[in-house]
Image: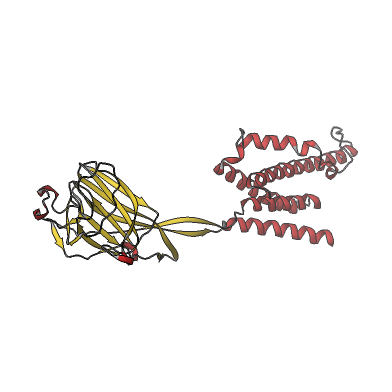
Amino acid sequence: MTDPGEMIEIVIREEAFVGRMVKDQKEGREGQEQDQTIALGHGTPTIVSARPVWANHLQTKYWNEPVRQVLEDGFAGPNRLKSTPAVLTRVLSAGYSLTIALISAAASGGGEELKIKVAVSALFTAAALLTPAYATTIYFTANTVLPAVIQPTNYPAPMTIGLTGGAGYITAFGYQGMFPKNPKSGTAIAPSNGASEENLTVQNDLAGTEGLGVANSHQWGISSQDVGFIAPTDAVVLDFANVKASVTTGGTTYSQNQVTFNVYQDYAGADYEVYGLVSGEVNGTGANRPVWAPVQTGTIVAGQPLTVSTSSFYTEYAIGVTDCAIDIESVDIQYSGTTTQAPESGTFVLVGIAMMGLGMTVRKRKA
């Protein structure tokens, strides 16, 4: 199948070919008029070939030289057909000039083969411009919005956190003792059973943004600076059971593509851990014992935002630390969809004009 670059080159060659033919036909008519003038005793003799111009249409002068000029004009360089704006501009110009040539040929009584050639060339141009309908991937993102607070505010667990765009909601739970304290830095540690359930806190983190943490207290032996954050051994578990797998908006249906956790690292000294629940349930036993898969783990860098993104979707995610403190500022769920790009309406106009011209010429030849 001919690719777009080859099709465009064909159109350019057709344009140059027809242009040269129109010029020669005009010169032929002028030469005949001059011969008639000489026969009446006026003017200067001009030698005009008796052979019709159509017999020369395959000669090199109708093909190579005009094509070379056209290519040098707008497509210089080895990659001349790869510049989309230049190609479209040049082909559009060719299309309109061919359409005008078609009308002019019909009005001036030009040769029937010329009219057919112009019409066919216009169709080639339209074909090059007629981009088939194609699908484009588009995205839609649903975000969580935490309550605006002036001072640390505790919320009973489970806490419902809404998502924008009608994507449903996330249910948050607080846990203390889900990760062992002070393991070797850089070691991935899966959540453990036996964690105690805690309430949640929303407070401004050290970046001045509302963040979600665990409503812990000094009874766990944590530093006062860590209170309200996801502190040593703590975790916030986010349940996605009520997050929609697909969202329809603006006539387009989007499906889950990626989830991003926007975290802030308040205090450093140990590791953060992000895991997804593969099966079972938190603190489950026997057949319900939880199986966790690591999403991302690493060493906390104080005073820096942390973005954790994954295309692996789980029913629940545990975000916690072995020591020090972080908080969850927001969660973004990206959905992807497709939209169909239709051909430009002007292309159909060009096709119609070319078809009309070709049809009229064929009917006239049959008559």
| Residue 168 visible from this viewpoint | no
Residue at 84% across / 61% down in the picture? Answer: 366
Q: Nearer the viewer, residue 180 or 31?
A: 180
Q: Position of residue 346 (x, y in %)?
A: 59, 56
Percent x, y of residue 215: 15, 58
Q: How is the image coloured?
A: secondary structure
Residue at point 90% right, 39% down? 39
Q: Is 69 left or right of 237, judged from the image as shown?
A: right
Horizontal and vertical percent for residue 28? Answer: 82, 41
Answer with left or right where residue 1 lies relative to residue 344: right
Residue 305 lies in quadrant: top left
> Does residue 146 show up?
yes
Residue nearest the viewer, comparing 190 with 169: 190
Q: Quadrant of the C terminus?
A: bottom right
Residue 314 percent across, percent down from the top left:
36, 60
Tell me if residue 90 comes above or below residue 131 in the rendering: above
Q: Name the residue rendered at 67%, 43% in the picture.
A: 9
